[in-house]
Image: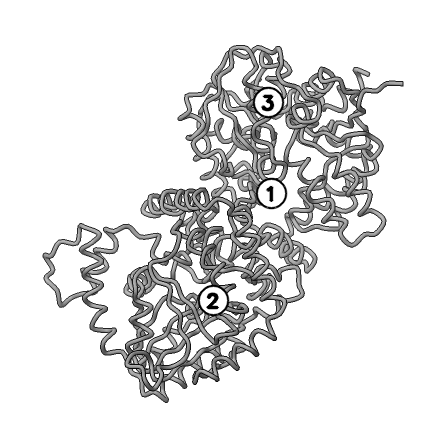
Amino acid sequence: MSTRPRVGLFVTCLVDLVRPQIGFAAVKLLEQAGCEVHVPPTQTCCGQPAWNAGADGHAREIARNVVAAFEGFDYIVAPSGSCAGMIKRHYPEVFETDAVWLPRARALAAKTHELLSFLVKVCGMTGVTAQYAKRVCYHDSCSSLREMGVKAEPRALLATVGGLSIGELSDPQVCCGFGGLFSVKYPEISERMADDKIADACATGAGALIGGDLGCLLHLKGRMARQGKTLEVRHAAEVLADMGGEPALGEP
Amino acid sequence: MSPDPKAFPQAARDALKDPLLRPALGRLKTHFGAGRAAAVQRYGDFESLREAGKAIRDHAVTHLDDLLVTFEASVNARGGTVHWARDASEARRAILTILQDAGAGTVTKGKSMVTEEIALNPFLEANGIVPVETDLGEYIIQLRKEPPSHIIAPAFHLSKEQVAQTFLAAHTGLDPKRSLEERNALVQEARAILRAQFETADAGITGANFLSAADGAAVIVTNEGNGDLTRLLPKTHIVVTGIEKVVRDMTDVAVLLRLLPRSATGQPISTYVSVMAGPRGTAETDGPENFHIVLVDNGRSSLIGTEAQDVLRCIRCSACINHCPIYGAVGGHAYGATYMGPIGAALNPGVMGVAEAAHHANASTFCGRCAEVCPVMIPLPKIMRHWRAVEYSSGLAPKAITRGLGLWAFAAKRPALYRFGTRVAARLLRLMASSGMVRALPVKNGWFAVRDFPAPHGKTFQQQWKARR
């Protein structure tokens, strides 16, 4: 019998659709850290778009699917502070009045982690053997920062990547303006926030913007492309898994 | 500028294009953000202080009826009078009656957001009474006929050049060639003009930051001293405030006084803390002869027992506003309401109705910074989400959103269908891409109004994972 922790990887809907290599990078890192990785095929999305839009019924049904798909594992890990935050912080709210599902949701929430903090805090990972010869800046997603308390871990791991140096943003605690449906409902406000974040990133002299949440990265890269800016954008897991040589987000 | 909360999207777009607004809003970080951070750092265990503040305000909200009854008895015992106002109209009428009984023609005002909320000034003017705002920021926007753009800094959206222009246009009796380039020149000019108003006003109106039930006292914090001149010089003093401001006693107030200025401006304490309790005593030479307190409900009590109840803990420090990236982008006028930023987003849909103020609750990325800095730990994003749920379940949400979410949710609940859909979507997006980016969809609003979309590289993760294993 294996004593390796059985980890259910919550791939996230954006990673599944737009950037599968983040998922594979997560698998690689989790296996390097000694985990047995499973990817339940019945997972779809965490339900956060519905929950944030106030569509509680939809959110509950989708959340039930996630609870059922993942409750059998020792841990549930997502390469996203936002999806992990939804499960850990908000599923207990989603099922607040549901006597049957609330305990199951709470149990799942208790073993839910954001990937990078899981690698450091639970698996004890202190470094990687990857190479990425660039100066980077790290974008903290608000969910990672405030819902999951992830701040030091990505920086600590990235600092061990060969050739990599980190330049801090002047306002790392400020939102980039993504906010899921917010970016669609109020595009011009979102644009201003993105432009401020991109200007901050460019001012660090970094050649790449690294983050832990694909939502923010899609938004920032999408805006940079419209502005004609060429800063490389990647998920931290890709760099840590030594996949930094592959085309970056939005590159052919 | 529109006073209409429903016009938020257009008002926000206009604000984003205003070249004068951006540098003004840029000062949020240096004026307030940095000050709060330093004050919190210096204090030490600020978290315990927040916990204490939250407990005090929670007690107040859950014992509001008892505290208000005690408060009224204490005010009466000191010779003051309490007036109850269920809504804005009752509040305005109560104030007018007091002023008419006092034979008042002019009334000086200290800063009070509740009087903005009940639109008191135009009502007084229509009834032949001249209100004069004496807080410098309020005075400036009164001259400009604008509403406040911020709770504690009502003229925050203006540059000193704009203020100079305002004074040159308004103070016509002064030398038009005088220099108003220095900030101090502006302050001195306003001081001189307001001094005469203080001395001749028939009545004074202030707000209240806190009410002590045990003492029948109202407490205000100011940095200009205008609150004291407003309340002490005229014969009649009226305090206009929300019913939720009451707490048990001065011990509670003392805790909140440590939280408020640190959270607001980063000051350990404001320049003035004024305690107002009743008219002047027979042996006293200063203070008003008549003391009135108008307690305004205006929708507040309807929040008790709802998921939005915690918003009543608010002590109006503006920390949430000062740290809100949406407010920082569009400023306060875009909200078209007295309370803007995160506190407005949590409060307005409750007191105005979701149909009226839904944009306020929706215009948030849920970044959570407002809740992080709130001195009394109001779960602001959670309350905004509650209003979104009310909007959604009432059928008030935009049809494009509900239909889109419905379709997506239909698939997300059916994993096989969902996997099929994402396979098709990944393929389609890849086909539509050029140089790695999807440049535009047929839709010209939403995402593609300002951004491209990084295209998938081909197959979905689930497809590739299945093929590998």
Q: Is residue A200 left or right of residue A146?
A: left
The amino acid pointed to by label 3 is Ala
The amino acid pointed to by label 2 is Phe
Chain hosting mark 3? A
- Which one is in front in this view, the residue at disc 2 or the one at disc 1? 2
The amino acid pointed to by label 1 is Leu
Residue position marked by numbered label 3 in the rendering: A236
Chain hosting mark 2? B
Q: Which SS class for mark 2?
A: strand
Residue position marked by numbered label 2 in the rendering: B210
Considering every residue shown, the one lying at the far right of the view is A1
Q: Residue A103: percent from the left, percent from the top? A: 81, 45
Q: Is residue B346 left or right of residue B465?
A: left
> Can residue A122 be seen in this snapshot?
yes
Q: How crowded is the residue under tag 3: few (<14 C-alpha within 10 Å), some, or many (20+)?
A: many
Quadrant, the C terminus of chain B: top right
Report whether mark 2 lies on the same chain as mark 1.
Answer: no
Earlier residue among tags 3 and 1:
1
Q: Please tell me which residue is depicted at 51% across the width and 59% down the height of the picture.
A: B6
Chain hosting mark 1? A
Residue position marked by numbered label 1 in the rendering: A181
- Residue sitting nearer the eye, B157 or B98: B98
Q: How crowded is the residue under tag 2: few (<14 C-alpha within 10 Å), some, or many (20+)?
A: many
